[in-house]
């Protein structure tokens, strides 16, 4: 495979950063099963030995790619919604932003989704993050007076993940999927206001 067009210059980025950045470019061309230490290393303009020294295996590499992907989303959510007042509007805004980010990096998200299904370490990290996210949402819901905030928080996380999957399959925004999220929050907002 000729990856010359994908190679990054060996400028100021560290070897590790170049290898991690290669995931986004490779995701545009390859499936998870096609990734090898040699291919990732070539795309990052480093040696296969450098890849192995940094990550060991493709599974370990994808675990770090997944971690960095989730951190990127979290940082954007904090940056863009952190100053909003707690409430249903902030929960919705953060969730819609998460969907937008997933579409912006659609190929990388697809690669990561496959890694979640095939690499236990990646699946475990996703489970931990979903649990933490549902707890954060449930705390906000509890302050808003929702009954069963833990259950609603877990439902919400799964709904957002499913909406992201629907949009990934469609290749763009699916208004109906986003409207279901709005409707769900509207229902709980009304329920909270009655108690």
Image (cartoon, grey):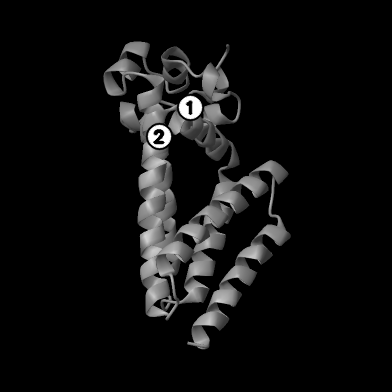
Q: CA distance from mark 2 to mark 1?
A: 8 Å
- Cβ atoms at labels 2 and 1 below 8 Å apart: yes
Residues 177 and 103: in front is 177
**Label 1 crowding class (10 Å Cα cut-off): few <14, some 14-19, many 20+?**
some
Q: Position of residue 160 (x, y in %)?
A: 55, 56
SS for tag 2?
helix
> Dividing the picture into quarters, in which one does residue 78 lie?
bottom left
Q: Position of residue 87 (x, y in %)?
A: 45, 77
**Apparent side of residue 186 relative to residue 152 in the rendered image (left or right):** right
Residues 160 and 45: in front is 160
Position of the N terminus by quadrant: top right
Q: Position of residue 34 (x, y in %)?
A: 54, 17
Total residue callouts: 2
SS for tag 1?
helix
* Extreme residue toward the bottom, this view: 194
> Dividing the picture into quarters, in which one does residue 142 lie?
bottom left
Residue placed under numbered mark 2 in the picture:
122
Residues 112 and 108: in front is 112
Q: Is residue 86 visible?
A: yes
Residue placed under numbered mark 1 in the picture:
118
Residue at point 49% right, 56% down? 157
Q: Which mark is residue 55?
A: none
**Apparent side of residue 19 relative to residue 166 in the rendered image (left or right):** left
Q: Position of residue 111 (x, y in %)?
A: 53, 32
Q: Is residue 1 above or below residue 127?
A: above
Residue at point 54% right, 40% down? 109
**Apparent side of residue 31 relative to residue 79 in the rendered image (left or right):** right
């Amino acid at each position: 495979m000729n990856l010359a067009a994908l190679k990054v210059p060996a400028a100021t980025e560290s070897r590790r950063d170049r290898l991690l950045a290669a995931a986004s470019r490779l995701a545009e061309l390859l499936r998870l099963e096609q990734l090898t230490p040699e291919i990732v290393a070539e795309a990052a303009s480093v040696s296969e030995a450098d890849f192995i020294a940094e990550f060991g295996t493709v599974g370990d590499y994808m675990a770090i790619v997944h971690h960095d992907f989730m951190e990127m989303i979290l940082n954007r959510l904090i940056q863009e919604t952190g100053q909003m007042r707690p409430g249903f509007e902030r929960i919705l805004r953060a969730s819609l932003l998460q969907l937008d980010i997933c579409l912006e990096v659609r190929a990388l998200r697809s690669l990561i989704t496959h890694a979640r299904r095939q690499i236990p370490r990646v699946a475990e990290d996703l489970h931990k993050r979903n649990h933490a996210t549902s707890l954060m949402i449930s705390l906000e819901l509890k302050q808003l007076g929702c009954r069963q905030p833990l259950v609603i928080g877990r439902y919400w996380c799964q709904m957002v993940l499913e909406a992201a999957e629907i949009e990934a399959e469609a290749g763009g925004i699916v208004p109906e999927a986003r409207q279901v999220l709005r409707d769900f929050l509207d229902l709980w907002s009304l329920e909270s206001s009655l108690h």
